[in-house]
Amino acid sequence: MEPDGNFPLPPPFDEAVRRHEHELMRYLMRTTRDREDALDVFQEMWLRAYRAWPTLASAEGVRPWLYRIATNLCLNRSRDRMRRARVIAEDAPEFVSETSSINGSNEAVVHLRDAIAALPSKQREAFVMRKFGGLDYEEIAAALACSPESARAGVYQALKKLRAAAGG
Amino acid sequence: MKHRAIARKVPRRARPDAEAVSILADDLPAPPDAAIAGDGIDAMVEDAHRRMARALRRFRRPAVRAGITESPLGRLLVAEGPRGLLAVAYLDTPGAAAPLEALRSGYDVIEDSAVAVRVREEIDRLLAGDSAPIDGHPVDLSLVAGDFQRRALAHLRRVPPGAVVTYQGLAEAIGAPSGQRAIGNSMASNPLPVYVPCHRVIRSDGAIGNYGGGVERKLSLLRAEGFEIGPDKRLPPQAVWGHRRSHIFCRPGCAAVRRASRPRWMIFADAEHACGAGMRPCKLCAPA
């Protein structure tokens, strides 16, 4: 490779893993709040990224793209969990009422998550990447293939809806 | 049933906690969570590595090293796998993106300039008259699309510099006597030009024909290998026909050329190249 060359490829997969794994693990821990969940999503995220690696056009956008995969996996997971919880609630009321009455503040967080999961997908992804991933609007825009203004508007709309849902 | 009633009574919008409130206060990133400590994350990453290595092993793509080089034949993309050279692509041609896509879908492509530098040196030496480094460089025909093309290209590796075969002759040699057009297509999509010498295939009428990297490149390669090709882009009059089996070479019009089976003929740049390839002159037409 010429020193000035522009090799038309993203970095090797393993290099990207090394570069981003810690911040993504932190992000996953933050969004899932569960060690096992975070580990599961982490692995699934990298496996998906690996499979899709050949479709990546360039080095730019690798980070937001990874955040997008991570975000979607987390949000899908919490949605599935809610669905499951609802089924359990009907089948085994004792179990659910016991856990939900033990920790009231957890419930508020669950409600916030519930409300996040109910957001339109673009607002939801933008909000989670912004709040828990700490991405800037340029990066969110790259991940969602939209303009930074539209990413900002998505977060704004999400905040508005979540505040309303929280009754505040 | 009593419990169920309690669970239902909890209002959905009740009690937003302090954290939820602070998260919804503005659009700034939420402050780091003190409960998620750095060394805890390190341990998790370690743990995840072990699990991932197991899962990845199942569908890991083989690694190839690839780079770009400025060669005398133009800008080239070069890729080499563990079994040999996989791709050489002229980057200024319309189909230049195809080999890279093919590489990326089947391999983990790692940028490495050393491979490209080595190929450039070998091409320099070929153009200076020394084909040994290229002949000795192992090639991997994995990117070749089908069995027909693979057979055609494998056969071509046996045509030495200073010699050419015809599309028709190559078609017959791999057992497809009516396949000269398919041979043309196979040459056009050769993933390893120069290393699999598709420039050493010409038309039966003596015109040098087309080339995936452009006719000018085919001309420079054939000229570097000893063919004195003029502006008419045809084989020179001193070219001779050599028979692979009998190791005898003849003038183009010799009766022996018309008689013997076509797949076994190669056309040499001149008598000297034919002798260099271990052939002796025909006693009928006395080409040397």
Image (spheres, helix red, strand yellow):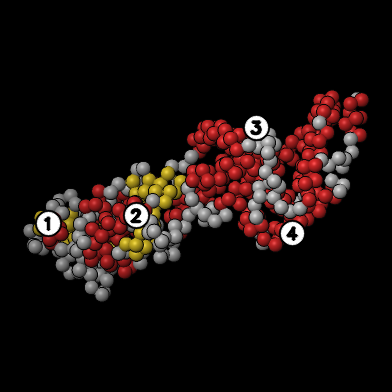
Amino acid type indicated by mark 2: Ala
The answer to whether the residues at label 3 and label 4 have Cβ atoms under 8 Å apart is: no
Mark nearest the camera among 3 and 1 is 3
Residue at 78%, 49% (x, y): give it: B24
Mark nearest the camera among 2 and 1 is 2
Q: Which residue lies most toward the bottom here?
A: B231
Q: Is residue B39 above or below residue A152?
A: above
Q: Which of A167/A79 is in front? A: A167
Q: In the image, which disc is placed on residue A153? A: 4
Residue that badge 2 annotates: B116
Q: Are marks 2 and 1 on the same chain?
A: yes
Q: Is residue B18 found left or right of B77 in the rendered image?
A: right
Real-space Cα distance between discs 4 and 2? 47 Å
> Label 3's element?
helix
Q: Which of B38/A83 is in front? A: B38
Q: Are marks 3 and 4 on the same chain?
A: yes
Judge the density around disc 1: few (<14), some (14-19), many (≥20) Cα neighbours within 10 Å: some
Q: In the image, which disc is placed on residue B275? A: 1
Real-space Cα distance between discs 2 and 3? 45 Å
Residue B169 position in % (x across, y down): 28, 57
Judge the density around disc 2: few (<14), some (14-19), many (≥20) Cα neighbours within 10 Å: many
Amino acid type indicated by mark 3: Glu
Residue B152 position in % (x across, y down): 33, 52
Q: Chain of mark 1?
A: B
Q: Are marks 4 and 2 on the same chain?
A: no
